Amino acid sequence: QSALTQPASVSGSPGQSITISCSGTSSDVGAYKYVTWYQHHPGKAPKLMIYDVNNRPSGVSDRFSGSKSGNTASLTISGLQADDEADYYCRSYTNSSTYVFGTGTKVTVL
Amino acid sequence: QVQLVESGGGVVQPGTSLRLSCVASGFSFSSYAIHWVRQAPGKGLEWVALISYDGSNEYYADSVKGRFTVSRDKSKNTVYLQMNSLRSEDTAVYSCARGGTYSDYWGQGTQVTVSS
């Protein structure tokens, strides 16, 4: 149950687009559609941003989108805004019927 | 509105036990699986355990398997995390989250500190 691999940090200027990768294996990310993305501001509860690889919950801005290719999932934030600055985590279901989070990515808006 | 409220955290010595509670309200408790997730100081989120909507299935991270037990009481709308043989590396904020394949509501968490 090794954590999924994410870049430690990603930054961008307001209005730009950034992409966060989430690299797993054929036992987790590559095997199932159950990849989710969470936005986490320290001290607050995580917020679901994307579920089932590329679905947005009601109320989440369409600036957030998800995709997957092979064993790697990605979260793209377009039109970057100041309040997008947060930690982002991916999570995947695994072939052991368990779940595993990514290592987390700190997004900085320059 | 949907709420999940954790309690039961505290400061304990290594090797001892603690039971956390997660009280749910604002939704049909018996229809949802519940996760436990933790975040150690300065670290990322770590998945800990999952209990199915009816309590018939439990799943654990390797790091806690054999030491932690998750259970639920539908009469109290509560999920429990029994933590035994606690270690310093279990020090973290523990949160519960609603849902199986995706978690749409989370609690604020309860701090567990394991220290001699």
Image (cartoon, coloured by chain):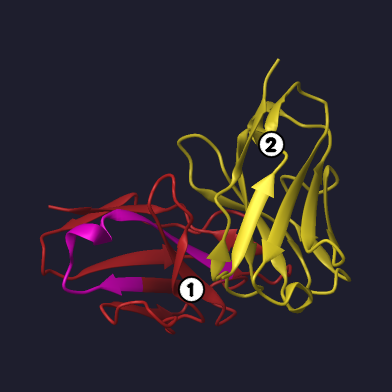
Chain colours: A red, B yellow
Dot 1: chain letter: A
**Amino acid type for the residue under numbered disc 1:** Asn
Question: Exactly how many numbered labels are in the figure?
Answer: 2
> Mark 1 sits on what residue?
A71
Point 45% across, 36% down: residue: B42
Residue B72 vs residue A103: left or right? right
Point 50% across, 34% down: residue: B41
Residue A91 point in image, percent of width and height:
53, 65
Residue B71 vs residue A2: left or right? right
Mark 1 vs mark 2, foreground winner is: 2
State which quadrant residue B56 falls in: bottom right
> Mark 2 sits on what residue?
B9
Q: Which residues are magenta?
A: A75-92
Dot 2: chain letter: B
Residue A63 point in image, percent of width and height:
25, 78
Residue A46 point in image, percent of width and height:
47, 58
In the structure shown, which secondary structural element does the residue marked by tag 1 occupy?
A: loop
- Circle 2 packing at 10 Å, graded few (<14), some (14-19), many (20+), is some
Point 84% across, 37% down: residue: B84
Q: In this rendered view, identify the residue nearer to me: B21 or A82.
A: B21
Residue B24 vs residue A36: left or right? right
**Amino acid type for the residue under numbered disc 2:** Gly
Circles 1 and 2 in contact, beta carbons < 8 Å: no
